[in-house]
Amino acid sequence: MEQVQRVISRAGERQVLMGEENMGIWEESEIKSECKLERNEVAIEFCAQSRNESFARMVAAAYTAQLNPTMEEISDIKTAVSEAVTNAVIHGYSGGDGIIRMRLALSGDEVQIEVTDHGVGIENILIAMEPMYTTRPDMERSGMGFAFMEAFMDELEVRSALGRGTIVRMKKKIVPGVLRE
């Protein structure tokens, strides 16, 4: 079995889980496929190219619009998705060929977003999540991707295994009853 790293962040508190796990997480997501009235889900796949980052942002924003979010909530979601997709392109595939899969699910007043790549994986998730850390200083990367995801979403989970890829799961509750513009 391969060593899988898993870090979950809720309200800035990180929990680290490591060990040998069935790598079936790459084939079957924990976001369950349940098309019921209280839950809705979509999934898309696209080439790991920087030009598709804006496409992923727009898909996430349009899908989340069903919950009637504020502009600030949409902006937070778009930023988090942008960072997750950019990380997959730049770090997961090093700008090379690959596929990114993005799944979105609505459950009650919460949006769940999952961005998956089958790239190089992350050697140490905790170090990678530190602000200003980057594996690509040659590209003048700021190293703020995970910090932004953590700040703008209610929950962030990162799973990775070297040579197998990375799954980034994010959740954000859309506050009901807020006066919308």
Image: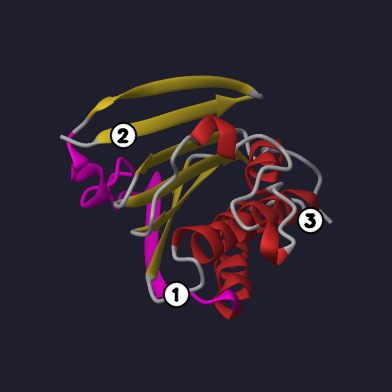
Quadrant in which the C terminus appears = bottom right
Give the residue number, with chain letter if any, for mark 3: 71
Q: What kind of residue is marked 1?
A: Gly
Q: Amino acid at mark 2?
A: Val
Mark with earlier residue (2, 1):
2
Mark 2 highlights which residue?
A: 4
Q: Nearer the viewer, residue 36 or 72?
A: 72
Pick whichever of labels 1 and 3 is earlier in the sequence.
3
In the rendered image, the vertical position of residue 86 relative to residue 176, given as above or below: below
Q: Which residues are magenta?
A: 22-50
Asked if residue 179 is positioned above or below residue 41 in the image, the reply reads above
Q: Amino acid at mark 3?
A: Met
Work out how far the residue at label 2 is from the one at label 3, CA to CA, in angstroms.
36 Å
Q: Horizontal and vertical percent for residue 121?
A: 40, 49
Element carrying mark 3: helix
What residue do we see at 55% from left, 64% from top?
A: 90
| Residue 44 rendering spot, x and y as whole percentages | 39, 69
Q: On the image, numbered disc 1 is attached to which residue?
A: 96
| Residue drawn at (58%, 25%) of the image | 10
